[in-house]
């Protein structure tokens, strides 16, 4: 019998474990299962994604509930439809020798009446997403007033997705004396608040340290110019011919765009984001699990619930807005005892974020060079050699061998090898033979800044992002270039204030810039951009190149600087007359010289 027997599990569950081929419990299972079986207690369990948390709470719940009863006794809340279905499927496998067990998945995108019917047949356990669960409670389609066990799975993810109010509302319909088991990869203050509000002296199980990255994942970063980000992504993919990866982007727009470019360039790629229908999402995930897709380009929200054990690489095409989210991204690889690599493609202005992430995950990043074209050619060449070596001979070609010999009889072994390998090598060589070095030096010193090149034919823009958004002038410049795809020298004279900024481009790019920023969000709020009549031939108080120079001698507004009653941007669109005025835009006050 397996080591699971020592945890206190009963025979029907042990038989299912044997069928599944499990032999040794993971650390979180080994520490959690005995406690939950022996005690009626609340618990907080902190462990990385992919460490076997479903079994850690699933086996104790299945052993403790009364299968003979048709009353709902267990509720499991999870952040996404995919994770909800995955947990439901796993619980059914764990409980295959428990006759009468009924586990029902409740999630959006499917018939709510059909789900209600399944529950009325007698569901001992409900696995649900918060939104659909709250909806069904509101319609009185289910009763959770008698549940004995409640699991909050991926609690930090649910709170990141804005489910705090839904969770608190759902829990208010449950009995106070239930056992609540909270499982999370990280422990931000919002998760701690849930634990404090709804749990009574919970036992805590921590695998590793809080918020720390998994030991099975190594972390690398590649420093490139922002405009070379996509080329760097392609080189990293080409350098790893067997790559099976998730590529993370910040926005749905970027996710779709990067996936389309990869497909156009011949990669097996697809996008996964919130604008896809549920049917489209299901098709993409099916193709990814069967490895028809090697590079899944996804947003953070859409990727939640992806549970594929063999992902070799996570590529951070863009770093997340919330640094803590990096832990979840990197946790998609290095699962089920395997090792994985988390790669980050960054520009100079993002280097400080690497240090911040290192503090959170308590792991060091290794700076690596983006491979050169010839390194990629060599890698692909030997990959082909190993593929040929490992290929099983198809004897269906035997009848054709005489004619093949006839065609190739004039060539020596060495010549045949050269010809076979030239087919693949030539394709990469022709593409990469004139490839430039994408790597850039570190640092972000003042001397690296380009001189302002204000010309008669340039346009000045106002943008509602500034230093309070965590953006210095180089950060904002990189953001503008990423959105517009303009070359480095075509975005210039960037001045960052506290809550807004200005920048210039050549006037020929006006339509491109305005169109590119339509619908763009930063930190979950809409980015607004307007054209200023002043072309930026002078610096403004509080600009990004100085330390609030001129702030006390006048800025936009009253003589003493920025007025205290200046309208603050809080995410909603403002009328034009509410924007701070710059010279030439119609404002009555002018900056004193």
Image (cartoon, rainbow, N blue to C red):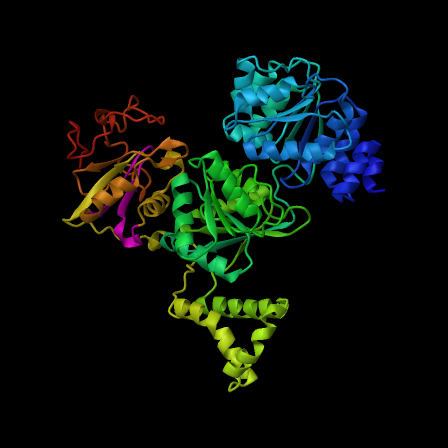
Q: Quadrant of residue 159?
A: top right
**Residue 220 image position (x, y, % from top left):** 54, 53
Residue at horizontal 57%, vertical 80%?
Answer: 402
Residue at horizontal 84%, vertical 37%?
Answer: 5
**Residue 304 image position (x, y, % from top left):** 54, 37
**Residue 166 image position (x, y, % from top left):** 53, 20
Q: Is residue 219 magenta?
A: no
Residue at horizontal 60%, vertical 44%?
Answer: 308
Q: Quadrant of residue 330?
A: top right
Query: For this rendering, which residue is in front, 209 or 263?
Result: 263
Residue at horizontal 77%, vertical 24%?
Answer: 64
Q: Is residue 9 visible?
A: no
Can you say which quadrant of the picture contains the N terminus? top right
Count of labels in the image: 0
Residue 592 falls left or right of residue 289: left
174 shown above or below 110: above
Query: For this rendering, which residue is in front, 162 or 55?
Result: 55
Q: Is residue 278 visible?
A: yes
263 shown above or below 126: below
Can you say which quadrant of the picture contains the C terminus? top left
**Residue 513 image position (x, y, % from top left):** 26, 43
Residue range highlighted in magenta: 486-506
Residue 66 falls left or right of residue 501: right
Residue, far front: 399
């Amino acid at each position: 019998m397996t080591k699971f027997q020592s945890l206190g599990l009963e025979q029907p569950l042990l038989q299912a474990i044997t069928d599944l081929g499990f032999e040794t419990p993971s650390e979180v299972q080994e520490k959690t299962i005995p406690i939950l079986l022996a005690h009626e207690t609340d618990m907080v369990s902190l462990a990385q994604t992919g460490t076997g948390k479903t079994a850690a709470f699933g086996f104790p719940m299945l052993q403790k509930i009364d299968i003979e009863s048709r009353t709902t006794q267990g509720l499991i809340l999870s952040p996404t439809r995919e994770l909800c279905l995955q947990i439901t499927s796993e619980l059914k496998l764990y409980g295959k020798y428990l006759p009468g067990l009924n586990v029902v998945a409740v999630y959006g995108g499917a018939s709510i009446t059909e789900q209600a019917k399944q529950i009325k047949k007698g569901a001992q356990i409900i696995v649900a997403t918060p939104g659909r669960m709250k909806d069904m409670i509101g319609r009185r389609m289910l009763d959770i007033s008698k549940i004995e066990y409640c699991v909050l799975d991926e609690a930090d993810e649910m709170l990141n997705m804005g489910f705090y109010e839904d969770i608190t509302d759902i829990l208010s319909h449950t009995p106070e004396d239930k056992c609540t088991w909270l499982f999370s990869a990280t422990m931000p203050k919002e998760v701690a608040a849930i634990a404090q509000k709804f749990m009574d002296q919970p036992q805590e199980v921590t695998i590793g340290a809080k918020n720390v990255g998994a030991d099975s994942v190594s972390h690398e970063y590649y420093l490139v110019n922002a405009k070379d980000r996509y080329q760097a992504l392609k080189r990293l993919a080409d350098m790893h011919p067997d790559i099976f990866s998730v590529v993370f982007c910040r926005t749905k727009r970027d996710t779709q765009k990067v996936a389309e470019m990869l497909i156009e360039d011949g990669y097996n790629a697809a996008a996964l984001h919130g604008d896809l229908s549920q049917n489209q999402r299901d098709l993409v995930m099916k193709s990814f699990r069967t490895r028809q897709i090697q590079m899944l380009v996804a947003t953070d929200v859409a990727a939640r619930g992806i549970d594929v054990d063999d992902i070799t690489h996570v590529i951070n095409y863009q770093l997340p807005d919330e640094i803590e989210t990096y832990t979840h991204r990197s946790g998609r690889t290095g699962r089920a005892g395997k090792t994985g690599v988390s790669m980050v493609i960054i520009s100079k202005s993002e280097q400080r974020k690497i240090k911040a992430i290192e503090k959170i995950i308590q792991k060091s990043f290794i700076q690596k060079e983006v491979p050169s074209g010839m390194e990629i050619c060599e890698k692909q060449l030997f990959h082909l050699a190993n593929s040929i070596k490992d290929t099983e001979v198809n004897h269906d070609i035997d009848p054709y061998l005489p004619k093949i010999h006839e065609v190739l009889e004039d060539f020596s072994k060495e010549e045949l090898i050269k010809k076979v390998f030239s087919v693949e090598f030539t394709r990469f060589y022709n593409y990469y033979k004139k490839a430039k070095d994408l790597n850039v030096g570190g640092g972000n010193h003042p001397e690296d800044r380009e001189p302002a090149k204000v010309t008669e034919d340039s346009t000045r823009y106002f943008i509602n992002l500034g230093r309070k958004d965590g953006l210095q002038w180089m950060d904002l410049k990189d953001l503008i270039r990423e959105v517009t795809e303009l070359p480095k020298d075509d975005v210039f004279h960037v001045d960052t204030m506290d809550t807004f900024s200005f920048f210039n481009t050549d006037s020929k790019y006006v339509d491109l810039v305005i169109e590119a920023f339509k619908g763009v969000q930063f930190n979950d709020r809409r980015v607004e951009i307007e054209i200023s009549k002043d072309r930026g031939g002078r610096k403004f108080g509080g600009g990004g190149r100085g330390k609030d120079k001129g702030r006390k001698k006048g800025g936009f507004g009253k003589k003493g600087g920025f007025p205290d009653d200046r309208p603050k941007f809080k995410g909603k669109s403002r009328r034009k007359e509410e924007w701070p005025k710059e010279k030439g835009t119609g404002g009555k006050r002018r900056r004193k010289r």
